[in-house]
Image: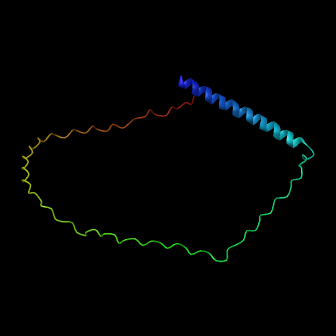
Amino acid sequence: MAFGNSIFLVLFFAVFAVLSNINGGLAARQLLQTTTPPNVPNLPPFPSIPNLPRPTTLPPLPSIPTTLPQPTLPTTQPSLPMPTLPPLPSLPAMPTLPNFPSMPTIPFIPFLSPPPSKTSP
């Protein structure tokens, strides 16, 4: 059901986009075909920005509070008692593999192509 709703929504947006582009194209064509520019009414002038009085002296900036010194971290680590580990058991010797004869090589047989034909087709 959700898939059907998403398809409907995508189709709606596609149709809306196509129709809005058609209306925009018709409006642009109509504006290009007019010979006289449209009448624009005269707008009133912008109001001027009032001048505010400026203070002669600025108040002092607040001082930055000082921070307390931070504690330092130790530069060396304390040594920890290291437990003694038992020695690793020795591995048994690996058995030797028997020697197999090497695989015989296959002789190379050159590809013999047929001789060129004397007559052309």
Which of the image's four quarters has the C terminus? top right
Judging depth in this view, the residue of 80 and 10 nearest the camera is: 80
Residue 26, given in percent of the width and then of the height, sits at 82, 36
Residue 95, given in percent of the width and then of the height, sits at 8, 43
Left or right of residue 28, residue 17 in this image: left
Judging depth in this view, the residue of 78 and 63 nearest the camera is: 63
Q: Quadrant of residue 111?
A: top left
Examine the rendered structure and indicate whether residue 106 appears above or below residue 82.
Answer: above
Judging depth in this view, the residue of 32 and 78 nearest the camera is: 78
Examine the rendered structure and indicate whether residue 9 appears above or below residue 68.
Answer: above
Left or right of residue 36, residue 74 in this image: left
Residue 70, given in percent of the width and then of the height, sits at 34, 69
Examine the rendered structure and indicate whether residue 117 appears above or below residue 43.
Answer: above
Left or right of residue 72, residue 52 in this image: right
**Furthest residue to the right?**
36
| Residue at screen point 89% across, 53% down | 42
Colour scheme of the picture = rainbow
